[in-house]
Image (cartoon, helix red, strand yellow):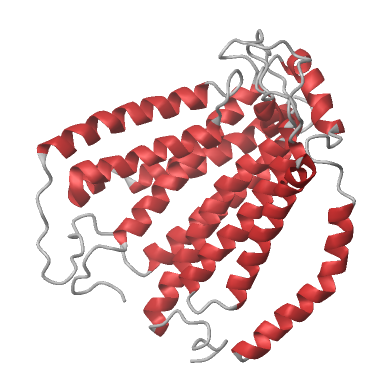
Amino acid sequence: MSQALALFPWAAATWLLAIGVYAIVTSRHYVHLIGCLSVVQSSTYVLLLAVGYRRGAGPPIFYTHPPGTPAVDPVVQALVLTDIVIGATVTALLLAIALQLHKTRGTLDPEKLRPMQR
Amino acid sequence: MTRRARLLLCVLAAACLLPACLHVALHMPPFGAHPLPYGEAINALATRQRHVTNMVSAVNFDYRGLDTLGEEFMLLGAVTGTAVLLRGSRGEQLTARPGRVGNRPVAPRSDAVVLICRALAALTVLFGVYVVLHAMTTPGGGFQGGAIIAAATALIFLGEGYRGWRRIMRTGLLDAAEGGGAALYALCGFAAMAAGWPFLHNFLPLGTPRDVFSGGLMQIENAGVGFAVAGGFAVLFVEFLEETRAERDGDGA
């Protein structure tokens, strides 16, 4: 049972990545595609936090516990923290591009938007 | 490329990648017992070396401070790009009316909503500042606190309506907070260089552990990140909500 549970974080990260990439490939709308990109990105959060987890350890904050008490990895947490903020702003940038695209071309369907087409 | 061909290409790529992925997945260390040499070293040393109790902040603002500077400028780049894309085609009018869908009437806000939003917005800003200030001791920091402060501006929009909200949100001020925060972070690095230390060297007095103002230079970098994130997210709100306002004659397409 614990063996299966131990695989669960990796499986969750893989599933998020796979379902996100599949949805991007078959997407018919750019706003949907940008949402799928966020799903792909969240797989990295799950993966990083799972790598940094240590069984029985506390948070990497030594305010009430003295330094030296078992704690999870602060490096991956710092990575995820900045990743979330950057992800949110990059999503905003992509949505702004989609908005401008809709103004000039009138559609957001990748099938109807051939590259370099006037 | 047709839909079918695209899907076929995706399946082909997945089939090529799958053996490598499986190989890695089967050789992963067990969950919960991953070797963490870098993290363990920081957990063991950072409180003694940098006098802070929040290890995540120690990583963000000191041990990996240069990376955070890069992320800071990615934030600046993304926000600038969004502002250029949306503002460029619209012009900057502060008096524009909000857009409406069809003939749907705009219901007046109840006094209860206005009251709750005003009280909550003030408290949310206060909480955001609290989170920014406690970066070095307890869970907190410029990234989280800045996002909380920016969220308060959405509450102001809910309570005051478009016109009142737009009067409060000075775009120039928000732009200055966004760019100035990133500049402050970079200047911290150059200040250390000017004094003869390596870039971003923590040259200020470190203070005592568990004190809110411990951490030396990390405090200033953290404040810069707080300004940049709060300003950046607020600029994004302004730009996207501006898009919903009604177009008038003489506006660009």
Q: Is residue A92 above or below residue A5?
A: below
> Residue A51 at what x, y percent from top left?
77, 41
Question: B74 or A52, which is in the foreground?
Answer: A52
> How many dots with numbers?
0
**Which residue is nearer to you in this view: A101 or B178?**
A101
Residue B249, image quadrant: bottom left
Q: Residue furthest top?
A: B208
Residue A99 falls left or right of residue A73 = left
What residue is drawn where x is 58% and y is 20%?
B138
Looking at the rendered image, the quarter that the N terminus of chain B falls into is bottom right
In the displayed structure, does residue A60 sit left or right of residue B176?
right
Vertical side of B34 occupied by A86: above or below: below
Q: Quadrant of residue A26?
A: bottom right
Give x and y (percent) for residue B40. Answer: 82, 26
Rendered-image quadrant of the C terminus of chain B: bottom left
- Of the pair A20 and A99, the residue shown nearer to us: A20
* Residue B43 percent location from the top left of the image: 77, 22
Image height check: is B116 above or below B206?
A: below
Please say if B44 is above or below B32. above
Which residue is drawn at the image coordinates 67% and 25% (left, top)? A59
Residue found 40% across the figure and 43% down from its top: B174
Task: Examine the image and state in which quarter residue B55 appears.
Answer: top right
Question: Farthest front residue?
Answer: A1
The percent position of residue B2, horizontal first and vertical second, equals 61, 91
